């Protein structure tokens, strides 16, 4: 992964954005020697958000199972039948 200074971002923003769009590789921006932000292309960001949403759903499901909030197949079928009417 490429690393750039925040001053480079300020001076060459258009070039950095072109590089990201072309290479699809994130750029780590540092400020005072410390990581400050990542620059990523829109497509990669949106894909990451979709994946995060799926993972959050899985985590909620696992938490529900751990708490005993589950239903049998027959119970779920009955609930869905009422909901779909």
Image: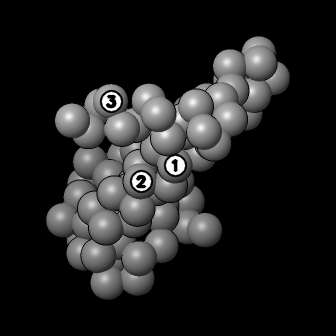
Quarter containing the C terminus: top left
Quarter containing the N terminus: bottom right
Residue at left offset 29%, top offset 76%: 21
The residue beneath circle 1 is 54
* Whether label 1 touches label 2, CB < 8 Å: yes
Return the residue found at the far right: 66
Q: Secondary structure at mark 3?
A: helix
Front of the two marks 1 and 3: 3
Q: Nearer the viewer, residue 59 or 20?
A: 59
Residue at left offset 47%, top offset 33%: 78
Callout 1 crowding tier (Cα within 10 Å): few <14, some 14–19, many ≥20: few
Horizontal and vertical percent position of residue 58: 63, 42
Horizontal and vertical percent position of residue 69: 68, 19
The residue beneath circle 3 is 82
Q: Quadrant of residue 83?
A: top left
Q: Nearer the viewer, residue 20 or 52?
A: 52
Q: Nearer the viewer, residue 34 or 21?
A: 21
Q: Secondary structure at mark 1?
A: helix
Q: Is residue 7 visible?
A: yes
The residue beneath circle 2 is 50
């Amino acid at each position: 992964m490429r690393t750039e200074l925040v001053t480079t971002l300020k001076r060459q923003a258009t070039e950095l954005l072109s590089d990201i769009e072309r290479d699809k590789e994130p750029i780590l921006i540092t400020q005072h020697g410390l990581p400050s932000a990542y620059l990523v292309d829109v497509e990669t960001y949106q894909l990451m958000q979709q994946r995060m949403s799926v993972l959050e759903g899985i985590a909620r499901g696992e938490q529900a199972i751990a708490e005993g909030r589950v239903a049998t197949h027959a119970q779920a079928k009955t609930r869905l039948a009422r909901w779909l009417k």
